[in-house]
Amino acid sequence: MGASVCGAGYYSNMCSSSREEIVEVLDALEAGYKRALDLSFDVLTTPERLAVLERWERFRRWQPAVEHTLINQLAEQADPTELGGKLAPALANRLLISRAEASRRVHEAADLGERRALTGQPLPPVLEATAAAQRGGELGAGHVAVIRSFWQRLPDFVDIETRATAEAQLARLAGEHRPDELARSEEHTSE
């Protein structure tokens, strides 16, 4: 496997990877998924089946965190000629997803993914606590939608520290509650 070069600061867990390493990891994931499709779960007990489903949910929750970096890099570095148009429609066409879904992914990546300053310096995600919880597999798409909706509805006069505290509290609660329960607690928070 090619050597990784890890960064410093906020993205110290993020590494610069070789093309070979990227291909190797994707090939291993694909092979693992193909093997999983052929599994029979007959030997498992009910608690074991629930534990397996919890692990699959964590895998599902990690996937967008990987995609955010790719999408943000495309947004920053690819021009419309390379993409065949604007980013969201290009993703919709390439991935065979709806334009609405592609747009949601682009906006979510902007809030939760790696960002860069104009100088190229890494910046933390806009929703730093939510991004960390997603990378930890603690919250899923429904949780993210509730937190992003809350964030977007905050009045402009709310200062950055208060915003960050509220977002961190919702991200923490998201790890303990279903999205519908989080939405109810968010409604009480915003009152």
Image (cartoon, rainbow, N blue to C red):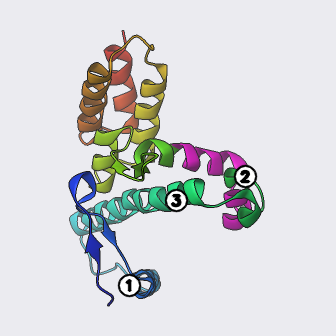
Q: Position of residue 39 (x, y in %)?
A: 39, 84
Are the residues at dot 1 and dot 2 in contact (C-beta closer than 8 Å)? no
Is residue 4 visible in this depiction of the protein? yes
Label 1, secondary structure: give it: helix
Q: Earlier in the sequence, mark 2 or mark 3?
A: 3
Residue at image location 71% in from the left, 49% down from the top:
99
Label 3, secondary structure: give it: helix
Q: Quadrant of residue 35?
A: bottom left
Q: Which residue is mark 3?
A: 73
In this picture, residue 188 sits left or right of residue 173: right
Out of 29 and 53, give the one closest to the viewer: 29
Q: Quadrant of residue 48?
A: bottom left
Residue type of the residue flagged with mark 3: Gln
- Alpha-carbon span between mark 2 and mark 3: 14 Å
Out of 75 and 189, give the one closest to the viewer: 75
- Alpha-carbon span between mark 3 and mark 1: 18 Å
Q: Position of residue 189 (x, y in %)?
A: 31, 16
Residue at image location 47% in from the left, 85% down from the top:
34
Q: Is residue 12 magenta?
A: no
Q: Which residue is mark 1?
A: 21
Q: Which residue is mark 2?
A: 86
Q: Which residues are drawn in magenta?
A: 90-107
Residue type of the residue flagged with mark 1: Glu
Is residue 113 visible in this depiction of the protein? no
Q: Is residue 95 magenta?
A: yes
Of the 4 image quadrants, the one containing the C terminus is top left
